[in-house]
Image (cartoon, rainbow, N blue to C red):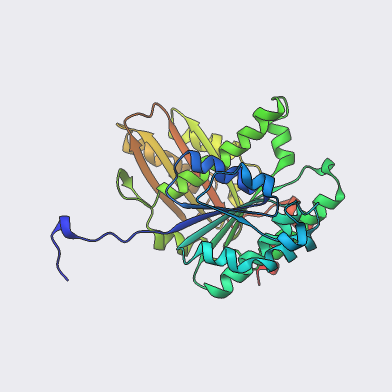
Amino acid sequence: MTYRSEELPRVGLDIVVLGVGGGGSNTVTNLYRRKVPARLIAVDTDVNTLSVTKAHALIQIGETVCRGRGTGGDIAKGRKAAEEDIDKVLEAVKRPDLLIAVCGLGGGTGSGALPYIVSELKKSLPDLVVGVIGDIPFKFEGLERIKNAQVGLKELLPVADFIVVNMNDMLLDKYGSLPVREAFRAVDLLVANAIESLLRCFDPKGSIKHVDFSDFVSAVKGSGLCMMGFGRHRMIRRALENAIENRLLDADPSSAKGALLLVQAPVGTSLKEAMDALRALSEKYYVERILWGLRTDPELRESSVLLIASGVRSKTIEDWIGEVELLQR
């Protein structure tokens, strides 16, 4: 069919960010305040947490099992809570093109409820692309939380398309001298900045080079373990180096099977400078498959870079749960 340019219909994307448990609900609240272009849904057993969460939909699960309270770190109780109210979750999620689930792995809801929710979503929507961003607890938080995180990660790997893991122990190394509130706020900002950059990269409006959603799907489907970093600097290459430095997973970008690179830069950025980050990924880190997008903004005074490296290897994760590729099968 032939259209005039002003008549050409746009194909919209329906993207859902699903915050599960207290940590996920906190991220959803941050994104709600930033007015990101996505449907924001919070799921929790704890009514008190939901009461202070900002989202487009708030879903209490496991009223019978948890009676409006948390799971007490019991992943079996978290799963039962999800089983009790999975229909409410599926109804709220509907049929999106992309779902990003955010949680703290280690608690009963994140490690218990989320794997079941993702599994049921994939059963009803087999073409749905699902990504998970999960935080791994500090070692000194106790063996129970570590074991919960191991179980949750093992169960998520076969059902999610990609999983970004952030290790709180690396947070301690990087931000340990900061006040507690500021240190955790730094991680909240990392996750919020990353999700916002990812959601906006698909819109061609204002983009020098936008990321085609179909290319994104091809790049992340079944990509497994990912590392994520977000960095800022006046120079784009330095912003990339800061993004790699800010990662919270002990993975080398050189181990990546592919990379998603999203750059936001001031107007007037040269082509050479825009290519510097791509050149570094291909020549320094030998990443063979790079998907990238570039947006310029007249209000920016420095560049920002989001890097998601897919299919990476992490010694810590492999020591924990074994070879990731075997778990994906």
Q: Residue at x 51, y 46 (%)?
A: 195
Q: Nearer the viewer, residue 159 or 305?
A: 159
Q: Nearer the viewer, residue 171 or 88?
A: 88
Q: Residue 267 appears at what percent x and percent y?
A: 31, 32
Q: Quadrant of residue 299?
A: top left
Could you tell me which quadrant the C terminus lies in? Answer: bottom right
Judge from the rendering whether residue 279 lies leftward or rightward of residue 310; answer left or right.
left
Up/down of 232 relative to 309, above or below = above
User: How many marks overall?
Assistant: 0
Tell me if I can see residue 321 in this picture.
no
Could you tell me which quadrant the N terminus lies in? Answer: bottom left
Q: Residue 311 appears at what percent x and percent y?
A: 60, 58
Q: Residue 239 appears at what percent x and percent y?
A: 49, 34
Tell me if I can see residue 77 in this picture.
yes
Q: Residue 222 appears at what percent x and percent y?
A: 57, 66
Judge from the rendering whether residue 31 lies leftward or rightward of residue 202; answer left or right.
right
Q: Nearer the viewer, residue 316 or 281?
A: 316
Judge from the rendering whether residue 58 lies leftward or rightward of residue 10; answer left or right.
right
Up/down of 154 relative to 17, above or below = below
Q: Nearer the viewer, residue 24 or 126?
A: 24
Judge from the rendering whether residue 15 lies leftward or rightward of residue 137; answer left or right.
left
